[in-house]
Amino acid sequence: MTDLHDTLLTLDSHIDIPWPDRQDAWAEETPRQVNVPKTRKGGLRAVCLAAYIPQGPRDEAGHANGWKRVQDMLDVIAGLEGRQGDQGARICRTAADVRAAHKADDLAIIPAIENGHGLGGRPERIAELARRYGVRYMTLTHNGHNALADAAIPRKDLADSDTLHDGLSNLGREAIAHMNRTGVLVDVSHAAKSTMMQATEVSTTPIFASHSCARALCDHPRNLDDEQLDRLKETGGLIQVTAMGSFLKKGGGGTVDDLVRHVSYIADRIGVEHVGISSDFDGGGGIPGWKDATETANVTWALQAAGFSDADISAIWGGNMLRLLETAEQAAEKA
């Protein structure tokens, strides 16, 4: 009998790349949680690899540093495409590219950006990064307010007050317009609630949270509350539940069962078509049962044990995210 996991197009919507680059993306032995051999062993078929830009000062030097780093990191992600032995990896710019990679048994890599600070204060640059690298989403913020928007967690070491823009700045609204025109999804993980709610009004395509959990189950400022979840349903958006113990369970210690509990809660409240999966591997993620990419099948089995149908699991593991990517592509074509 075929294991369901072996038939799925499993897509993990948020993985960091180690930085500085260790040149171990194809190594059999490596401390990183995700690389090509580990995805093959665990049956993880598609990954969104994020160029993570730490929040720095909102000045000319800070913006210049962010702009340099985002390009350097995206260069490394682009360089992962290739083959070694019977293993292959492809940079995928569209949902169709992801499906084609899966059909060829190659790892699908979707480039992404974590923190709009990487644009260096110039929102129009997102179009350049989409064209050059195939970037498909960008988180508006990380921890700490930036020139685009308020973050869920202010940075006292950067002299942040509770709020800087009361949500989106004018630059942030401009950035979303550029993202909509270029098919880049608006990611509200790390964003303040005010930012997230305003983004649903400004964006002409549905928004999503690439790595967040349900605040009703774990009261963490990085999680989305019921009002935010309901807003995602109203606007056709998506939340990708993440394998970060402190977001899954108050005080930490979350497990795969806790991850599935969040998925179930969200599916029951706003529908299975609005929820997916992410790991935040190599960025702090990893929980008992899913400590690296080799253990990915445990998530599928836990979803089965929770009573999700095969069709539901297929949607949660990749179908919903691919649909959202296609929606953004179609909107960009019409823009």
Image (cartoon, grey):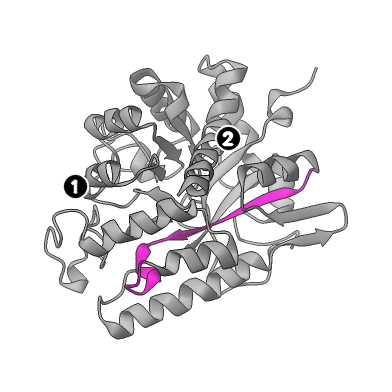
Q: Position of residue 83 (x, y in %)?
A: 82, 59
In the foreground, 102 or 199: 199
- Amino acid at the residue labelled 1: Ser
Q: Position of residue 254 (x, y in %)?
A: 41, 37
Name the N-terminal-most of marks 2 and 1. Answer: 1
Query: Which label belongs to residue 318?
Result: 2
Q: Is residue 156 left or right of residue 93?
A: left
Q: Residues within 10 Å of mark 1 (few under 14, many from 20)?
A: some
Q: Quadrant of the N terminus?
A: top right
Query: Which label belongs to residue 30?
Result: none
- Amino acid at the residue labelled 2: Gly
Residue of label 1: 194
Image quadrant where residue 219 sits: top left
The residue range painted magenta reads 105-123
Q: Residues within 10 Å of mark 2 (few under 14, many from 20)?
A: many
The Cα atoms of the two marked residues, 2 and 1, are separated by: 28 Å
Image quadrant where residue 240 sits: top left
Q: Is residue 84 left or right of residue 264?
A: right
Would residue 1 be seen by someone viewing this image from the given angle?
yes
Would residue 143 be seen by someone viewing this image from the given angle?
no
Image quadrant where residue 153 sits: bottom left
Q: Residue furthest front?
A: 334
Q: Residue at x 78, y 21 (%)?
A: 2
In the foreground, 132 or 315: 132
